[in-house]
Image: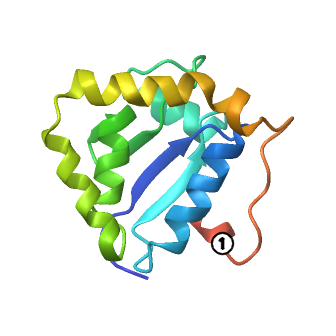
Amino acid sequence: MSMKPKKIILFDGMCNFCDSTVNFIISHDPDEIFIFAPLQSSKGKELLQQFGLSTESFDSLVLSDGNRCYTKSTAALHIAKHLSGFLKIFYGFIIIPKPIRDFIYQIIAKNRYKWFGQKNKCILPSENIKKRFLQ
């Protein structure tokens, strides 16, 4: 495992799309740069409070990178920058003005349960990736 400080991704643990996204990131993060926590978890809520974000509304992916915090499309693009292979090129979309990027992000976030479904509770990670999740 890399000795670099880990970047923490907070995600909606009840969302099927978000769960699939976490699995995708894990499979494209061979250096294990990212660790994860559901927004609904105590650790997730603690980090949200630390950055002055809502602990009640879970409509954004959140990336904690040390003392910096990114949300919505900016978080997604900063994550892509660190993934393996061609996925890094998606970071180039950072040049699109944030209001435009976030408008598109919000359409997906607002409809994610309708389009992809929702879980009744957060799914526990399998043993082989459990170390990648904050307890």
Residue 41 image offset from top left, x and y in percent: 66, 38
Task: Reply above or below: 8 against 105.
Answer: below
Q: Residue at (56%, 41%) from the top-left corner?
A: 11
Can residue 82 be seen here? no
Residue 104 image offset from top left, x and y in percent: 39, 28
Locate residue 71: give its quadrant. top left
Q: Residue at (64%, 36%) from the top-left corner?
A: 42
Give neighbour class at mark 1: few <14, some 14-19, many 20+ (Cα, 10 Å): few
Q: Residue furthest right?
A: 120
Q: Residue at (19%, 43%) from the top-left corner?
A: 94
Residue 135 image offset from top left, x and y in percent: 66, 53
Can residue 76 be seen here? yes
Locate residue 20: give its quadrant. bottom right
Label 1 amino acid?
Ile
The residue that mark 1 highlights is 129
Which residue occupies the foreground of this view, 132 or 100?
Answer: 100
Task: Classify residue 64 as left or right of residue 23.
Answer: left
The quarter of the picture where the N terminus appears is bottom left
Locate residue 79: give its quadrant. bottom left
Task: Classify residue 120 as left or right of residue 74.
Answer: right
Q: Secondary structure at mark 1?
A: loop
**How many labels, in total?**
1
Q: Residue at (30%, 48%) from the top-left corner?
A: 77
Residue 17 image offset from top left, x and y in percent: 64, 44
Q: Residue furthest left?
A: 95
Which residue occupies the foreground of this view, 125 or 6?
Answer: 125
